[in-house]
Amino acid sequence: MTDILAGALSGPLCHQHLTEVTRQGATRDVFDHQPNATNNEHRRRPRRGAPRLAQDCVLAVAADAAGYGIASITGHGVLAVACAVGTVLAAAAVCVFGHRGVKRAELAPDFISKLLETVEKRLELEMTVKTHDRRRWPATSNDDGEVDPIEERARKTLPQLLGASTKLAAEKNQAGELIAVTASHSVGVKVAAAGYRLRVERSISTMLSGRWKASWDLTEDTVTFRLRPTFPKSVPHRREPIASENLFKLPIAVDEDGHIVRWDLTAGGPHALLSGKTGKGKTVLINGVVMEAAMRGWPVWIADPKPVEFMAMRSWPNVQLVATDVVEIIAMLKLAHDEMERRYAQIDDGVDESGFEPLTVVVDEFRNLVRQIDDWWARVRAHQKGLPTSCPVHGWLPTLAEKARTAKIHLLVGTQRPDATFLGEGMRDNFDTRFSLGPLSPQGAQMMWEAPHLGVAVPRHARGRGTARLEDDRIDEVQVLWTPDPRRASSPEVLRILEDLKPDRAVHDRLAIDLGDESDLEGAEISEWTRIREARLVPAEAVTENVRVSGDGVTTSTPGKETHGAGHAISGSGPRPDVALVDAMHEVEDTGEAPADESQDGYGEHSHVASSRVSAGDLLLVDEDLWLWAMVEDAQDDLVDDGNICIDWRTDDDESGSLSLPAAEVVTIRSPLEPDAAAADVR
């Protein structure tokens, strides 16, 4: 009966606000209740089939902007249903025909009281309004026909932001749906301030349902807000021709318009910082950078503390080093520092630095690596007196970040989450190229982008989706190019992608780290720290018991190469080695889903707060019946409905929408944990 009535009476006047009227003391029972074993709360889902009829009559009334129409009715018995139908039809008739032509502003304040009065009179029962759901956008109409509710809100919002004289032009698609709004304004020099434009953009994105992007024309005093296109789920990493124009611009991702987002080594970002939790695509991005650098014939050194993330890169052409244990990694960073100093010495001798070959140094899992280094250093200091409190390697990385650009040494540092220790003390200024994968907490967004709302609403299930600074200096959402892991490649299409990305030849031989002898001539043990300070690079085939071999011990170098000084990259040529493709291992796509245990997903316990206290980055329960949670992208005062809060949200599956709620209305949220608390929960 509910579905029949809802379908028969649905229309432009019967689908927006939802008001539930019930007899005092009555209860509604049209859902099955399922306890959540994790948090002892109840999840509710609609009961399939015909709804259960409650003992007391329950009316669910849906209204448009003026408050008309009905959506569903449940009751006990045919007589109760008939009475309910007649009652609601009468109430709707009173509202529609009794007030025809009256403006919404005159009707809205007394709609509920008139509806309640009509229902009580017809049923001869004392009733009360149980719920009045204002969360959906109001639809409006005029004598000329229907008006798009989003367009109507735009016409009311933009003049408040850009001045009363603002003129609007709407653009619609073939289906009659609004896709863009262009505003001509006269606010003049105000829009020249980036902060002013940002405030307008955030307000429009929050006030209007959907996700909108602004394009400003400061000369013509116009701005166009256009619905953002949908991102593809995956964009394969294809090889592009390399020319002088893109030699130092490595493709990383695509923006929402399909434009390539690059790491420009010659611009203001010679070093790159990458943050992202496990399963968000961090390794995929790093593999893509490594393959692009290797394709250009540049040497690549990788620190892999896990140490299995980059096993396939151990035999990839032009990847010289893949250091895996803490001693080897410290030695690699020391050698990179030595190479930088060697190149600076050459510049002092008159060498033109433009002739240096770029060296890409990758340091993954930085926070994990710092913990490993500190634990190792504590053991070293326990056996060797006179050492400093902190391992000197902690000073090498900031020095590399500050000075290595001139020496054409480029750092790519990956970490699970932004860290104040790493991004403080001037480090942030040396990592202008940044990528954050997956949603950030407001604290992480402030750390990465200096704004607590940027990147907080990236869909959690969209692997490879993140936030980056684009070429026009905007910070926006991107989709990382999908670079397959050679270890898991099996399908012909994936193998073709890898074969296409492989360098035509190996320009640089694989290297090993020689730590020297473990004991002196008298048999006394030489400490690892002393050996690290004397470390040097040798060809991978020159393996002895005292040499740390990068990778799995399989060499692709050309025999007969001489050993150069510490930190000197060995150049040479040789046959193109095959990439180890493990056919027995099928490709497994990581869904990127949040952990099943909610206590480990970086958010706190459920709490009930007024909608005015909702903030960007919170998880909001937008549909209790479906147990649907969404990330809050922004929350602001509603510029159209006084006393309401507009909440812009996105689900894990990239669905988006907006809510307009009374400021005092209680909602259910989960706030992001503080970084230290989140890390403690995971451990």
Image (cartoon, rainbow, N blue to C red):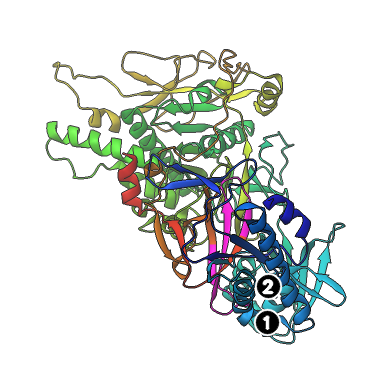
Label located before the other in sequence (1 or 2): 2
Q: Is residue 602 positioned above or below 213 on the image? A: above
Q: Is residue 649 positioned above or below 577 on the image? A: below
Find residue 97 and name its label.
none
Kind of residue at disc 2? Gly
In the figure, residue 683 lies in which quadrant? top left
In the figure, residue 88 lies in which quadrant? bottom right
Q: Is residue 73 visible?
A: yes
Whether 636 is among the magenta residues is yes
Question: In this picture, which residue range is highlighted in magenta?
Answer: 634-657
Query: At numbered mark 2, what does the secondary structure look like: helix, strand or loop?
Result: loop
Is disc 1 surrounded by few (<14), some (14 to 19) or many (20+) residues within 10 Å? some
Residue placed at 13% from the left, 31% from the top? 383
Query: At numbered mark 1, what does the secondary structure look like: helix, strand or loop?
Result: helix
Q: Is residue 485 positioned above or below 190 on the image? A: above
Viewer-closest of 528 and 96: 96
Q: Is residue 375 positioned above or below 58 on the image? A: above
Q: To which residue does mark 2 refer?
A: 67
In the figure, residue 308 lies in which quadrant? top left
Is disc 2 surrounded by few (<14), some (14 to 19) or many (20+) residues within 10 Å? many
Find residue 107 and name its label.
1
Residue placed at 73% from the left, 85% from the top? 186
Left or right relative to 378: residue 127:
right
The percent coordinates of residue 603 (x first, y second) are 40, 50
Left or right relative to 228: residue 331:
left
The percent coordinates of residue 344 (x first, y second) are 44, 46
Q: Is residue 456 visible?
A: no
Left or right relative to 521: residue 127:
right
